Image: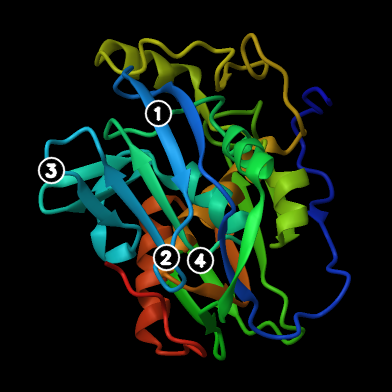
Amino acid sequence: MSTFAGQSEGPHLVFQPTQADSGPRCQSTVADVVAVEGFGYWSGKDVRVEFHPAEKDSGYVFVREDLENPVRIPATVDCRIETPRRTTLVTGGTQVEMVEHVLAALSGLGITNCEIRVNQSEMPGCDGSSRVFVEAIDKVGVRVQDALEPRLIVRETIRVGDDDHWIEARPALDGVTSFRYRLDYTQSSIAIGRQTVEFPISPEVFRSEIACCRTFMLEQEAAWLLKQGLGTRVKPTDVLVFDEEGPKENTLLFHDECARHKVLDMVGDFALAGCYVVGKVIAHRSGHRLNADFIRALLKEEQIEVPCRKTA
């Protein structure tokens, strides 16, 4: 475990893939039922999430089992609504929120189909990362299915955003998907500063370098949320809360953990495409809203090699 390594960005971290992608992967699902329990950061309510095996071509579907008539909510960008600092999905007035870390765990591990049963609207925050979900899924393993994973191939450069916040995707000539994130907090937090990371997206890299990276916020942001009656069960030891010196009552796992967490969020938000995006993705100060806008723009380009999974 490393501690905070200073204010300058330094050389950004780049992992090189070991081999080119050979084509579409087989679809997969969890091999057995496994559960994670915790409480929602925003609501403070206890919640249980169960990962269940799902049929091929079914994608990710959340099921609100706490309702008299359970509601199925497909994890697609069409179901997304705008909420601050998290990703929320809605079907027929019923919603699930803060789903990005759950979806990141599934997508990051290469799982394409899963039924996610919950007894509250908000997913458990755990430690603000995907680590607990990944560990739970690893306990039961993955079952390969007799169907190809749908893929969206980036064949031309596409860019969404403005001069200050943007995402761009370029063709991956080696067939390896990679995410590069540039974070810049120099105007609001010297402790966070500038960070840049880049990773090829594979189950091995996600599990070892991204899944454990926690959500973060500034001390003044945390104070404002508490005044609104939000996050009252969350302690600085649960997430990364930065003052001028660094994280309060906590220790960084990597000196660039904040930028790595942004990649984690991207993996989760990109899962809303309903297919695996093959391309070189570069993001500059993007967040959940821009990630969703970018997915919509990609889908409009109609560069899908294998049809996207059905959404209901």
Spatial CA span between label 2 and label 1? 21 Å
Q: Give residue 295's position: percent from left, percent from top.
A: 41, 69
Q: Which residue is mark 1?
A: 48
Q: Secondary structure at mark 2?
A: loop
Q: Which residue is mark 2?
A: 59
Judge depth for marks 3 and 4 and give the one in front: 3
Q: Give residue 283's position: percent from left, percent from top.
A: 56, 61
Judge depth for marks 3 and 2 and give the one in front: 3
**Tag 3: amino acid:** Asn
Q: Which residue is mark 4?
A: 167
Specify which label sits upstream in the sequence, 3 or 2.
Answer: 2
Specify which label sits upstream in the sequence, 1 or 3.
Answer: 1
Q: Residues within 10 Å of mark 1 (few under 14, many from 20)?
A: some
**Tag 4: amino acid:** Ile
Q: Which residue is mark 3?
A: 69
Which residue corresponds to the image point at 63% horizontal and 85% vertical from the top-left? 171
Spatial CA span between label 3 and label 2? 21 Å
**Tag 1: amino acid:** Arg
Residue 110 numbered mark, or none: none
